[in-house]
Amino acid sequence: MNLNKDKFPMAFRTSLFLALSIISIASAATDSSVVVRQRSLLDKLDSINTAVLGFRIGGTAKAGVLVSTLSSDQLSDQSPSRETQAYTDANLILTARPSSETEARVEVRLHKDWQSGYEESVNPIIGHWFSYDGLILDKHLLFNLGYMRVGYTPLTLYVPEDVVLQEPEIFASRRRDALAMRNLDTSTNRLLQGFNAEYHSGKVGLLSDIYAQGTAARIRNIAKKADQVFFDFDWSDRYMLAANAGASAYGVTLGGNFVSTFDRELSSRSRSAGTNYYYEDNYVGSGIFGFDSKELLSDLPVQFGVNGEVAYSRWIYTLDSVQVVDTTYSYSLKQQTSITTTDGVNLDTISEYYVAKKSQIIRDWYDTVLDRQSDIAFNIQPYVKGSFGKVDVNVSGLYMNNGENFWSEQAASRSYRGNTSVLNSASLFEGQDSSLLSLFRSGSLENMYFAVYNTNVLQQQNLMSKNEVSDVLSVGSESNYTYSRLYNNYKLAHFYRNAYSAAAYKLTEYAAVSEFTDPSVNMPLPMGLATPDRQGFSFKGDFTWDDAVELNVRFGHYTWSEIDDQFTQYGVGLGVDVAQLMTFDKPLMIQMSYEVASEDNYLKRKTSRIVAGANAGIWGPFAAQAGVEFLTKKYGNGLDLYDDASLLVNTVDEMLILAGPQVKLAPGACLSVEGGYMTNKVTYSTTATETGLRVSQELSIDKFIFMADISVSF
Amino acid sequence: MMQKTLFSLLLIGSAAFAASELKTNQALINGKIDTIESKRGIQVSGNIRAVYLGSYYDSDQKNVDSSSTMPDVERDEFVSADLDFHFHPWDFVRANVMLRLEAGMQDYFSAASKTIGVGWMNLEGNIGSDFYWVVGDFRQRYSPLTLNAPDVQVMYEPQIFSRERQMARTDAQLTGEERNLEGANLQFRRFLGEQAGEIRAEAIGARLRRVQVLDLSGANGNILPNDSVSGASQSANMDKWLLSGNIEWLPMNKNLLLGVTEMFIFDDKSSYSYTYRHEDQTVDGLDSKYVLQSINAVDSLPQRTFVTSVRVGGDVASFLNNPNLILDLTAEYARSSDDVYHSVAISDTTYFAEKEVLDGDAILATLNAGYKSGNTWKVQFSGNYIMNDSNWFNNLAQSPQFFAQRILNTDRDGTVSKYGVNAPLYSTFGALYHFTPKFSPAATTLATDDAGFANGQTSSYDIAPYSKNSWTSLVYTRSELALINSMSDPALQLSLPNGLATSNRTGVQTGITVGLNDFAEVQLLFNSFQQVKAESVFDKAKYLEYGAGAKWDVLKMLRFKLPLEISGSYKHSSRKMGMEGADSLGSGELKCDFFNAGFYWQYLPRLGVSAGWQYIDMTLDDLASLTKGGAGYEVPLVKGKQMQWMVGLDYSLTSDAWFTLNYGIISVENTYNVSSGTGANLNYAILDANEISYKHSFTQTIVEATINVGF
């Protein structure tokens, strides 16, 4: 760089700032025209895709290794310390387009774990996406049949986001991969199976749009086999019916949404009497309003608006049990040849007397409402964004007030579940550490960024069976026929170790696991904007300079009124596109952020996350990525794992470093090598058997990680 | 898929990343252009095998055990289709996927659910024209002593049978003597000019075995289900890996070869895993407590093997620039270094595995010499000399492609069918020529309730569908190799059960081929080997093989376009393994005579008639019959006669595409020594008092229709 060419002293440049703002608006307009051209190009590229009628096969394939070597002083002598995934994996996408308006889509997954030691009889492929979608009737009606991703509003049908501010690409891509294994993505749309239709009128008179949408989906399916345990299982069929409608004009949008999620009781009534079934029905209705200045005040240098939603929910908890509806008494005459009087005299006579017999006939099932809750939730989100010179500003606020008994099942469950053992799952720990890990798989970073996909042989240990028909999931005896049921033997089946899930918790289910919710991701609002019993506000600001330097500021304060718990959350992020800034011809991006969340009651949790990373183009097809993340979770009052104070978790410290090169081999083909180091230190306390005093203990697990893979899309 | 973003107005304020639309759009455009560029066609090929096979078992013998109630007819009916998808086959990076579609033939239950499996999957590509890489499934062969999958040879095998073998091998995805592996294979080849020749550098990293809990009772995954001898279970406590490098230089216009190979085969001890099992693994053992056990308790010690090989070779005929001369010579020396363990007693109940490193040497020299006069006639001598000592070990070269299995009428001898060659109903022809990808065995007691399933199991396999095929590309462990070698078929694998890499062998393998035009050929063979080191109480075993064969295409000789080929061969093989002080029992000789005769006449374009006959006569003297051993060998066998004939019609399009209708009979007659003191216990026969010899015979009548289409 030739500094002599810098003709503008700093003071002068600063003084010119305001004057230049007019020019910058003009340049923003130029940018806008580029954006318009980009959009047009994107449309054209999409139309190339949709213009191809008939049958097509495409997809992605990936092959490589993931080696995780664990070290810990607490590891059992009999524990493996290294686990290697060595695999070839392909996702084939088969599409058929009978016309440019509709598309049938099937996705199948093929997976092979490398070995040459024993014969694999059948390694089945699995179909994991079947849908028929279309945009018909002059593009007014969009429909989805089969698998679909649908989102309404944050209080009705939605997936709360799991956001890490300025998450480096090396981590973000791993999270996307883990989500994709479960058919999920980073959008806020919920993965469903059923039917969805959405109508948009386009401009009608003064209205810019009238819309209506209906969605029906089966959420759960009743178990078909009572005596064999598997995991896709529920007591009854569960359905969701939802609809919304609204209109917009001059940037103002008004609409309403309704989501009903209910158990279909009759689906479980064929089961034997004597078992109680519990149902949860959830109804949520909401109204939305929004205003965006762009349509009405398009000449302004800034764009502003507001979005708001008010919702009302009902939740009904019902016990379904057998009702005795018909009790009959019958009498019969009996003879007795010898009757002894109360004072012991044997009358030795033949007597006749009536005997009563009570019969109860079970005729029907009976609902008992055990609990009923309803409440209101409300939020409003004003925003403003615009460009000032080279500075782009995007600022928004939020005020929310959700009632204590508000519950919206289809908007409350996020994809990230955590508390799963992903890497080195066969490792064995001893004593208290084993007790700790049986309930608390604390590695948030491992859960967020790693996933394992295997095809494993079905054998007696993963074909679990039970002796009793009822209460399948609790501890109990095995079937006496365990060994003779190995008729699935040597067939491979697909297995996940993945901390993400598409399932939506019922309220009672969530209540059972809420303590274990990972506080490192959005602690104040673990169910997003639909979190019950939250009042508070937040602020988000994103500031970009010259498309090269991006600053993010976050602040939030919320109250959980039932237990008088106050949450405070703040964060700051910085992303620098050095290549743009310094006009390098190779990309170089640096990202970092710091986020903190805390509460002053309940478990007195406090979490902090520091993340930093970089992406760099090096030479030709060679690039490199790196990232580091530090995470601390503190439980001030201790997390009581067994509800008896026998084991209290106090602190968890985690760190993950990942770095490595990438080589672009061809369009859509990439070789990636990554090495990493991950630590997880859990401090917890137990009661010493001898003294009865609390003893602090520490479990420390370190993992060296090596990954190398080649991926190809075709 | 259609991803819907509804109510974007509501989401404006909550964007996760604040990147500008300009940048986001640019990333999207780049991605879409990449996607469009990466879609460059698809090529589909494959192979379809459809088989109807009825095997009708018959025997005059009085079968007395419960297996006599089992079906005497096995009908295998299936279609197995391998569809190979090659994605963007003409680009620098390619993806290949083979789907195997299998359908049994019945329409009573689960008719709609046919299995589709993943048979083969890899990514491959080139960087420039010199560098090739493949990740996933691949095949590779370096040399007979390093990386090789030894096949078995049948001289002038009649076409009616060789086609069946081809189908069974295709089902096992075998090609030549290449080994199928899963991992990464890198190959660099550069032609440096005529004098400098070509340099080749190759490297492989492959996982040979994966930590995996397998039930101890299934037919697949166990060499001997429900058995506890070492090598019975193929489940792995540790990940087993192969790392290898191979460098070859072919200077002088590729007429000289200088090569060096280094291989490292090891178990990753850090991955040693345990599993919880019931202490008592029998059906009655469910109340026994769970205990932590090694995944494979009968083969638990880690492998650590280094193999180093150097080889030189030269094509003298090409040096002399004489196109009629055949003269080439190669020599290979390999050394293995393998950890083995001995159990040393520390106390009455505690044992310690003491490690010993065994260094073994192997030498292979190959000479081809002969003369050919254009296409008119050819005389060629081929000879191999081997000197492999008893410590030589390389399971990547010694694991055979053929492990003799009971294939036909396995329900008939249910509980002992796992003993393969030692099962009483075994026939070489069944093992060699037949296969069923997903055989569903009958339960020993037919009932559909739980108790029926519990009581219906055999000790040879769970009554689960399993693949019956003797052909495989598995890499066995040392103890598995010892076990399957004890169950190798003497008619096919007597002298070299592990190919030219068989340990403890020295000797020569020679052959002379005389060819006349393209219509007649005669072969002579003579092989002589002996053990380098005697086994325990035995003398060194001596192996002798000789034979001859010929084929003659009569119509081709008369310049007809369509063939009428007659072929035949005879091979004698024997092993003598005496024992000091046991001269009265004989020299420990096991001898085998194998006859082949074939006929094939294509009388119309695409229509042909074929016939084949094979006969194996095996004799064991007293010592050999008493000491033959091997899993399941309980009653001394003194003579085994096997005969097979088959006739058929075929409709052939190419060497890979045909439809055949065949009828034939396999006859087996085994004579056992059942005199007292042999521990004789023939569970399928009633013996008369004082009977010292028992002859057991049976036939299997084969009715068969096959379709094989490669495309």
Image (cartoon, coloured by chain):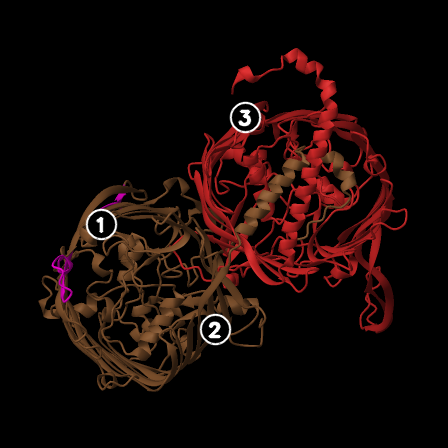
Q: Which residues are magenta?
A: B316-345
The color chain A is rendered in: red
Q: Which residue is mark 2?
A: B79
Residue beneath the point at 50% across and 67% down: B101
> From what the image shows, is residue A538 above or below residue B407?
above
| Visible residue check, residue B469 | no
Which mark, residue B197? 1
Across and down, in percent, residue B259 comes to 21, 48
Please tell me whether residue B338 belongs to the stretch shown in magenta: yes
Q: Is residue B45 left or right of residue A347?
A: left
Q: Chain of mark 1?
A: B
Q: Marks 2 and 3, Cα distance to the nearest angstrom? A: 61 Å
Residue A618 in view (yes/no)? yes
- Give coordinates of residue B492: x percent, y percent: 24, 69
Magenta residues, dominant SS class: strand
Q: Nearer the viewer, mark 2 or mark 3?
A: 2
SS type, badge 3:
strand
Taking depth in this image into account, of B313 and A356 the one nearest to the observer is B313
Q: Which of the numbered marks, if any, corresponds to residue B552?
A: none
How packed is label 1: few (under 14 Cα within 10 Å), some, or many (20 or more)?
Answer: some
Residue, x 64% and y 58% (percent of image)?
A51
Q: Tell me which chain the residue with mark 2 is part of.
A: B
User: SS for tag 2?
Assistant: strand
SS at badge 1? loop
Q: Same chain for the residues at labels 3 and 1, yes or no?
A: no
User: What residue type is disc 1 on?
Assistant: Gly
| Residue where numbered disc 3 is placed | A697
Q: Colour of chain B?
A: brown
- Label 2 sits on what residue type? Val
Tell me the mark number nearer the camera, choosing from 2 and 1: 1
Query: Of residues B173 and B416, which is closer to you in this image?
Result: B173
Q: Are marks 2 and 3 on the same chain?
A: no
